[in-house]
Every structure is written in C-alpha cells, then in structure tokens.
Image (cartoon, rainbow, N blue to C red):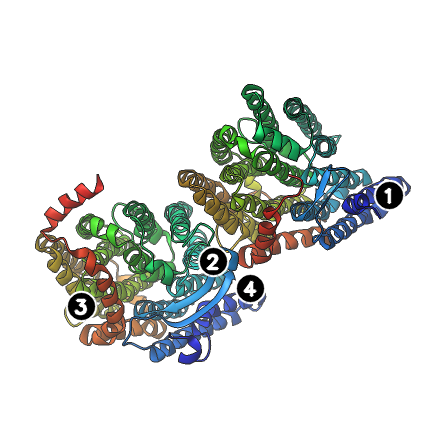
C-alpha cells in the first residue's frame, strides 16, 4: 500500500461505513436500524485503533496535503472518541423522537472525517475541504428534527453563520496564497518569516482568518449563533456540535497561528487576548441568566473557548510547547465533561416527556434519578474546575502555560471568570439536590444501555484525566514537540 | 530521612487519608441496607482515630523533620508527586480531625431524617479531604485536598441545613473558591519561578520550595494570594461574613467540623506555606496582619455580645478566638506560634463541644433563640453542668485548654509589641462577658416553660460524644506539655527560619510605618 492510503486509512474506514449505513438503512425496518449506531461505533473504534497503531509513523501524504504525526494521531483519536460518544448517546433519543434514520450516523461520520482532515491538513486547500465537509454535515445534524421549527431554525442559523465564517477563512487564505505564492503551511510560514511581504495585506489576512475561526469556535463577539443552535438542535447532536467542531478548529488554529504565522505573533497575540477576554466575559456572564440548560451549556462552552484562547495566547512564541500541550489536554478534558453534561440532558429527556431542558426540571433530581444526578454533579464540578476532576487539571495546566509565558495577569482574569462560572454550575447542583420538584414526570421508557455506557465512559474519562492524567498529558506533550510539514 | 518504611512499615498517612473515603464508597454500594451503614461509618472513623493515635505513638517528637514520608511520582512531566509527610503540627491537627469526625457520628445518630446515608458519606469524604490537607507535602496535592474538602461541606450545608441553607452553602463555596483560585495561580507562579532553568520541570515539592528564594515583589504577590485564601478559611476580619451564615444554617455535625477543623486549615496553611516560603513578605506584612487579628478579636467578641441566636454567638466567638491564632502566629516568635497552634487545638475541642451542646438543646427545644430559653438548669441539670464546663474552658479559665493557648499567644504578642498585646487582652475580658452572660440567660433566670421538665436530660450517647472533648480540654489545660512537645520542634524551626529576617526592631507602630515604606 502506498503511503497515501496508509495515512487516510481511518478516514477510509469511516467513509466505507457511512456509505454502508446509507445503503442499508432504507432496507431495514425501524427496529432493525437500532444496530446501525453500533456499526458506526465499531467503525470509530477500528479507525481509532488503526490510528493508534500508526502513532510511530511520521510522514506527509498526498504531496504534502496531510501530515501523519503524533499531533494528527492525538486529534484523530480524540475526534473519534467524540463521534463514538455522540452515537452512543443518540440512539434512544432518535428512536423516541421517531427520527431513527441511518442518515444521522452517516452525517456524524462524515463530519468526523472532515474534522480529522482539518486536524491533519498541512495545506490550505486540503484544510478547507475538511472544514466544509465538517460544516455541511453539521448544518444537517442541527436541523435533523425537521418537523420541529426550532431544529430547522437552528440548522438554518448554523448554515448562514457558518457559511459566512467559511468565507472569511477562505478570504484570508486567498490573501495568504497571494502573498506567499503557496498553499502549503510550511512554505507560507517560510515566506512570511523570511519576507519581504507587504505588512498591510498580511495583517488583513490574519484578521480574516482569525475572525473566521472565531465564528467557528464561537468566540465573542462572533458567538451569538451558538446558544441558539445548541438550544434548537436535537440534544445529542448539540453535544456533538459543541465539542467536535471546536476540537478540530483548535487543532487547525494551533497549526495556523502558532506554527505557520508564529513569526507574526506580535500581530495576532493582542487580537487573541482581546478575543479571549471578551469570550470569557460573555460566556460567564450570559450563562448566569440562562434558564434553559442547553443555552446555559452553550454559554458555558463559550466560556471554555475563552480559556482555550488564553492557552493559544501562551503559545505566542513558537518555541513554547507548553501552551499547545495545554490546549490539547484541555480539549480532551472538555470532550468528556461537555459530552457527559449533554448526555445527562438526553437521558432526562428520554425518561420524561415533559422535560424541556429548563433548570426547574432538574429540581429534586437527586431523588428521582440518583445516578444521573451523581454524574451530572461530576460533570458540573469538572466544568467548574474542582479537583479531582479532569476540568481541574486541564485548567491548572492551562494556567501554568499562561503564567509561564508571562501572562500572569491573564491567568488572574481567567480565574476571576472561573469563579463567576462556578456560580451557575453550582446552581445546577443546587436544583438537583437542594430543591424539591413541584411538577410530576411523565414517565417514558427511556432505558438505554448505550446511553448509560456513554455516560459511564464520560464520567470515567473525567475522573481518570483528573486522577491519573499522565498518559494523556504525555501524549499531548509528545504530540506538540514536532509537527510535520510546518 | 524519616521514611514510612523505617518508621512504621506501612503507608500510614495514605491509609489515614483514604480509609474514610473508601468506607464512604462502600456505603454508597450498600444501598438498601438502612442500618448497616451507620455501623460502617462509625467503624471507619473509629479505626481512623485509633490510627491517628498510632501515628502519634510512632511519631518522633524530638525533631522538626518531616516524618512518615511517602513519595511517588504522580504527574512526572509536571514535577508533581504524591508526597505525604507530617510534622508535629500536622499530627496534632490530624488527631483532632479524626477525633471530631468520630464524635459527630454518634452525635448525629438520630438527628438526620432525610438521605441519612449520603449525610454520613459526605462526612467521610470530608475527613479524607481534611486529613489529606494536613499530610500533603506537594503543593498541587495540597491544593487538590484543599478543594476536595469544599464539596462535601457544600452539600452538608446545602442539603441538610436550615431554611436559608442554599444561600449559605453557595456563599460558603464562592468565598472559599475565590480565595483558592488566587492561590492556584500563585502556586503555579512560584512553581515555575523556582525552576533551576527554563527547561526544568516546575517545582511543587514544598521541601524544595522552602529552599528557593523568591524576589521581594514575587513574595509579596504570592504571599497575598496564599494569605487571602487562608484568611477566608480562618476566617479573618473582614473576610468572615460567610461564617455566621454557614454556621447558622449548617446541621450540628457540619458546624462541629466546620469550626473544629476547617477553620484550622487556614491557620495551618499560614504556618505551612506563608511563613516558610515568603519570609520577607511576612516581615513586612506581619504588623498589618496583627492589626487585622486584633480587629477580629475585638469585633468578634463585641458582635457575639449582641447575638440573639445561640449558634450565631458561638460562630462569632470563633472569629474572635481565631484572631488569637493569627495574632500568635504572626507575632513570629516561638511562644506566639506555639500559642497560636494551641488555640487552634483548644478551639477545635471547645467550639466543637459548644456546637454539639447547641445542637442537643435545639433537638429538645426546637429553638436557638437565647430569649426563648432561660432557667434550663432546672430541667437539665447535667446539661447545665457540662455547658458550664465548656463555657469556662472557652473563656480561658486557667487549668483548662483555652487558657494555655490564649496565654501563650498573648505572651507572644506582648513580646512583639506591648500596645498590641494590651489591646488583644481586652478580647479575653469580652469573651468572659459574652460567654457568662449567655450562660446566665440560657441556664439561669426564670424557667420559661414548665413542659420542659418532661424532656430528657443529656443521654448517655450524648455524654459519650462530649466526654473525650472534656478529657482533652482538662489534659491540655493541666499538662499542656504533652501537646507542646509535639509542636515545639516545628514551631522552633519556623522561628529559626524567620530569625535572619527579623533584624529591624522598633515598636509595632514604627514597624507599620516602616512597612508602609516597604510597600511603596
């Protein structure tokens, strides 16, 4: 087999599975479709294994289109975990909402392929293809409950803002190509570093790309779509959308800014600082006033993007690997805790037909659903950043990077907003354990082993990353030591 | 080197720390066996208390070195290790923690009606966090335990507390968390500054950090970050406002642990981290901290004087008593530091006992308003006697533990500065005033309700839970050497560490002005 095929082996597996799912789906009765999620999950597992076994390899493929290195391996496995978790928590919900279609899993797989390509790309065109594949699949996922107005609205909103953002990135990329004469990250990086390149257009290119990415990761002031989209989308899809695209976008942001445009850090670091502070402010303060849990988690995820941007700031000098490793570890922690928190919402929606994602619906949950309340507490504590959870170590590691890079004042601001955010995460716990419920449930048979397994994996991930973080931490550190083709 | 292998042969600190948590997990798996879990909780805390006595027995009290050392790498790429070890101060406080955790189990045997099992589980996790803090010798590990103890207490106040429990629980959490976050950043900052070179791993080991020397500016900033975190816990005026709310709303057992041990964690942190790591900053800021401590002593006492709620009175008296702790510690001499530690120990015993008494009264009368009580010595003679004992001990009657600590702490303060010492002494007089007046109004005066004669006096279970506290209070009052011996080498090491920095003399007022110069 040629190098090219080996490099995209995991992606090929996912494509094959997605196509099989699409072909088989119409032939199956509704009950028969319930196994399709496991087909997708097995595809993710095998793809993750094949990625894992290629972790020693280091080469570029498709004539410097993608790089297979430890960095790609880290992100590909993380993204496959996201996809597998998303499928685990989806199945029962789709069944209950009578939208159990194979298309859903195929879309998740296609989006995942797009994200993986974004993470491993070292060429602007390849990157953009991945970005669009991810984006188009995501729009469809957001609007998947097509008979619900809110879901359609979410899909439409996501599509319009997303397309807008893609154009910004495309615009910036076009400028970069015009300035450097290449679409290859490394060649662009060299051209920018060695010059001579006109300052003005370069700054504009950087601003375009940054704005586009800010849309994609929902950084303030480009964040307004995110809570609406998460609120309107099917809950399991919202879980996927609030994690996957952000992970992939940060993989690309590090490659774009830290590595490719590292020599221009004087230009983008101040912008990134402003974005980060604005994002933390919006995320923490807006989440305070939300009554809808999905909106609350939406703003909370905006807050976390603010922290992640802090770590990106800390990578300003391209020699600093600590900041990059902090981003990687934070994304891993964020994956488990955020997927988990959304997963609990799915669980509750499955069990209670009256559940409409409002905070009041959580009242007395500690008695009604002790296990769900227990893991939700864990996820909330992790999102707050309390030890011994993944969220704490991630935040600790991130603050380390920020302080080490000489931005202690930024870390203090981050800590301040993490205090504000503690308030609304705690409020979830207050409702679950310290309030009694006034309304009754309308019980539905929502029992789902898949979902329980997904929540179990997320909870275990949160605890493991919090108590024994060494393997993931070392993987993150190894991943950023040497990025190929940059 | 005092390795645990040589000293005792098994990792006693790890067992002490995690035994309660493991018991708590076992209880969680025992769903559906309603009575057995109380037995598990009692057995686990009793075993832990015995272990803490074993720890003291094997403890070498003639050295200031850290003992029973356990050290394994935890996150090696960050230089974080699982490093546990104790000195005399930690040993004393571990014993206190284990004792109070044991006592509250029988004390709340019938008190909690709802979600009983979770209540006991929360206390077991709390004990793990508390003992962990006293054992941790790695800064990150210290922080982890520091935060872990926050969560169970939050639940204890928020679920089993009084009518305004949610407000109190959230306030408690946010106050403490705010302090902790600043501390976290300071921890990260000094860990990276203490590196030998920019490529080395950060230093979280306290042994190594104590040897590093930080610049004056770093010391001031980091000291303040740590100090605020600890001052919230102590709590020092003006960061004390969460305390009365938390105490009034918390269930009895929660108050006992909160006042008995959790406040001490603040004083312990100052001794363990603030003084050894930032000596320059300590010298500059000590006069200011003393002034704050004096305000706490006087203010706490005055506010106690006017409280209508018995529990609030005891809570504010804690603010006053803990003022003696910080005053003693930041007098920065041997007597003062020993006094501060003794006040911590004695306050843990006595305030724990007072909160238990308040709880027992509440279980009978269903009120905590002092105005609703009166003449209780008639129906409850035994209770009156016991309360009198703890009241007298708490106001500093010679021969009981309260006296020793406050006396030493005042001597230390007088050595540092006579005017400050004189002001602090007023606090002792005020303590006598509010405590005796409280006792008079509750136990003497006219009996308000004849029906109270039908209520039972202290039961055997209640007496058993108070007895160990009374015995220790007498012991520490009559022969304090047993306890002073434990802490003396560690306290001496702290003063030795401070000695070279204490060159500048002058009165406290002069020092305050001198430090103003240092600030700007």
Image quadrant in which the C terminus of chain A is located:
top right
Point out residue B499 in the picture as x, y percentages from the top left corner: 19, 60
- In front of the other: label 1 or label 3? 1
Circle 4 residues within 10 Å: few <14, some 14–19, many ≥20: some
Point out residue A119 in the picture as x, y percentages from the top left corner: 67, 40
Q: Badge 3 is on which residue?
A: B404
Q: Nearer the viewer, residue B364 or A181?
A: A181
In the rendered image, the vertical position of residue A184 relative to residue B431, given as above or below: above
Gap in Å between the C-alphas at discs 2 and 4?
34 Å
- Check disc 3 and report its element: helix, strand or loop: helix
Marked residue chain, label 1? A
Question: Of the residues under marks 2 and 3, which one precedes in the sequence?
Answer: 2
- Check disc 4 and report its element: helix, strand or loop: helix
Marked residue chain, label 3? B
Q: Badge 4 is on which residue?
A: B28
Marked residue chain, label 4? B
Circle 3 residues within 10 Å: few <14, some 14–19, many ≥20: many
Gap in Å between the C-alphas at discs 4 and 1?
45 Å
User: Which disc, if any, is residue A20?
Assistant: 1
- In front of the other: label 2 or label 3? 2
- In front of the other: label 4 or label 3? 3
User: Residue A244: which quarter of the image?
Assistant: top right
């Amino acid at each position: 087999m040629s190098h090219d095929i080996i490099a995209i082996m995991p992606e090929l597996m996912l494509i094959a599975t997605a196509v099989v799912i699409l072909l088989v789906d119409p032939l199956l009765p509704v009950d028969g479709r319930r196994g399709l999620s496991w087909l997708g999950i097995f595809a993710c597992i095998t793809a993750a294994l094949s990625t894992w076994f290629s972790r020693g390899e280091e080469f570029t493929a498709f004539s410097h289109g993608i790089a297979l290195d430890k960095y790609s391996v880290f992100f590909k496995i993380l993204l496959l975990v996201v996809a597998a978790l998303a499928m685990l928590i989806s199945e029962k919900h789709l069944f209950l909402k009578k939208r159990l279609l194979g298309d859903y899993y195929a879309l998740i797989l296609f989006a995942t392929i797009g994200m993986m390509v974004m993470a491993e790309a070292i060429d602007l065109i390849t990157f953009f293809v991945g970005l669009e594949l991810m984006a188009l699949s995501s729009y469809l996922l957001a609007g998947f409950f097509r008979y619900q107005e809110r879901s359609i609205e979410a899909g439409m909103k996501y599509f319009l803002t997303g397309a807008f953002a893609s154009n910004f990135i495309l615009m910036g990329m076009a400028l970069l190509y015009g300035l450097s004469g290449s679409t290859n990250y490394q060649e662009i990086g060299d051209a920018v570093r060695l010059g001579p390149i006109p300052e003005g257009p370069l700054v504009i290119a950087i601003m375009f790309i940054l704005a586009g990415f800010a849309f994609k990761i929902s950084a303030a002031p480009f964040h307004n779509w995110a809570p609406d989209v998460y609120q309107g989308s099917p809950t399991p899809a919202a879980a996927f959308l609030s994690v996957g695209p952000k992970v992939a976008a940060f993989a690309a942001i590090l490659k774009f800014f830290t590595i490719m445009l590292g020599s221009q850090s004087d230009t983008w670091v101040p912008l990134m600082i402003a974005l980060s502070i604005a994002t933390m402010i919006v995320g923490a303060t807006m989440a305070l006033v939300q009554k809808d849990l999905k909106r609350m988690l939406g703003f909370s995820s905006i807050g976390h993007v603010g922290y992640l941007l802090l770590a990106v700031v800390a990578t300003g000098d391209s020699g600093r690997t600590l900041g990059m490793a902090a981003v990687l570890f934070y994304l891993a922690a964020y994956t488990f805790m955020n997927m988990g928190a959304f997963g609990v919402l799915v669980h509750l929606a499955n069990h209670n037909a009256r559940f409409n994602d409002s905070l009041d619906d959580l009242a007395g949950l500690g008695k009604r659903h002790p296990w769900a309340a227990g893991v939700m507490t864990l996820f909330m504590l992790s999102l707050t950043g309390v030890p011994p959870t993944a969220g704490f170590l991630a935040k600790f590691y991130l603050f380390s990077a920020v302080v080490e890079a000489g931005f202690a004042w930024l870390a203090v601001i981050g800590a301040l907003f993490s205090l504000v955010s503690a308030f609304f995460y705690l409020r979830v716990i207050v409702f679950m354990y310290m309030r009694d419920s006034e309304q009754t449930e309308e019980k539905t048979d929502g029992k789902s082993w898949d979902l329980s397994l997904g929540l179990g994996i997320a909870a275990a991930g949160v605890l493991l990353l919090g108590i024994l973080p060494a393997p993931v931490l070392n993987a993150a550190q190894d991943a950023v030591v040497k990025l190929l083709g940059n | 080197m005092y390795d645990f292998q040589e000293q005792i042969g098994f990792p006693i600190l790890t067992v002490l720390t995690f035994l309660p948590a493991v018991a708590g997990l076992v209880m969680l798996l025992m769903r559906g066996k309603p009575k057995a879990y109380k037995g598990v909780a009692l057995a686990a805390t009793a075993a832990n208390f015995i272990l803490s006595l074993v720890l003291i027995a094997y403890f070498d009290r003639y050295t200031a070195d850290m003992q029973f050392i356990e050290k394994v790498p935890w996150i090696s790429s960050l230089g974080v290790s699982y490093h546990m070890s104790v000195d005399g101060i930690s040993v004393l406080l571990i014993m206190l923690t284990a004792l109070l955790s044991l006592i509250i189990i029988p004390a709340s045997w019938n008190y909690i009606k709802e979600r009983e099992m979770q209540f006991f589980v929360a206390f077991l996790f709390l004990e793990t966090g508390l003992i962990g803090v006293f054992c941790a010798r790695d800064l990150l590990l210290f922080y982890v335990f520091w935060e872990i103890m926050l969560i169970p207490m939050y639940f204890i106040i928020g679920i089993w507390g009084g009518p305004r429990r949610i407000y109190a629980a959230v306030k408690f959490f946010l106050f403490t968390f705010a302090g902790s976050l600043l501390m976290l950043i300071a921890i990260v900052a000094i860990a990276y500054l203490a590196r030998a070179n920019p490529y080395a791993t950060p230093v979280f080991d306290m042994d190594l950090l104590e040897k590093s020397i930080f610049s004056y500016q770093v010391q001031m900033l980091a000291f303040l970050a740590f100090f605020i975190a600890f001052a919230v816990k102590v709590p020092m005026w003006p960061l004390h406002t969460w305390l009365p709310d938390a105490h009034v709303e918390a269930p009895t057992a929660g108050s006992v642990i909160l006042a008995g041990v959790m406040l001490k964690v603040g004083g312990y942190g100052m001794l363990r981290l603030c003084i050894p790591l930032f000596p320059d900053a300590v010298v500059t800021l000590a006069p200011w901290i003393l002034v704050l401590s004096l305000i706490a002593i006087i203010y706490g006492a005055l506010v106690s004087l006017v409280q209508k709620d018995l529990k609030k009175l005891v809570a504010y008296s804690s603010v006053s008593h803990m003022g003696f702790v910080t005053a003693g510690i930041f007098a920065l001499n041997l007597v003062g530091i020993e006094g501060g530690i003794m006040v911590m120990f004695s306050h843990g015993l006595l305030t724990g006992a007072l909160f238990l008494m308040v709880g027992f009264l509440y279980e009978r009368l269903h009120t905590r308003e002092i105005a609703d009580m009166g003449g209780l010595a008639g129906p409850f003679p035994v209770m009156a006697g016991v309360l009198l004992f703890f009241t007298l001990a708490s106001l500093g009657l010679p021969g009981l533990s309260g006296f020793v600590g406050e006396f030493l702490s005042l001597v230390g303060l007088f050595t540092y500065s006579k005017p400050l010492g004189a002001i602090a002494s007023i606090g002792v007089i005020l303590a006598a005033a509010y405590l005796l007046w409280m006792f008079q109004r509750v136990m003497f005066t006219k009996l308000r309700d004849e029906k109270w004669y039908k209520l039972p006096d202290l039961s055997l279970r209640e007496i058993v839970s108070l007895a160990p506290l009374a015995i220790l209070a007498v012991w520490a009052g009559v022969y304090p050497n047993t306890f002073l011996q434990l802490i003396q080498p560690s306290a001496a090491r702290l003063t030795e560490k401070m000695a070279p920095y204490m060159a500048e003399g002058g009165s406290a007022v002069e020092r305050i002005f001198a430090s103003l110069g240092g600030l700007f």
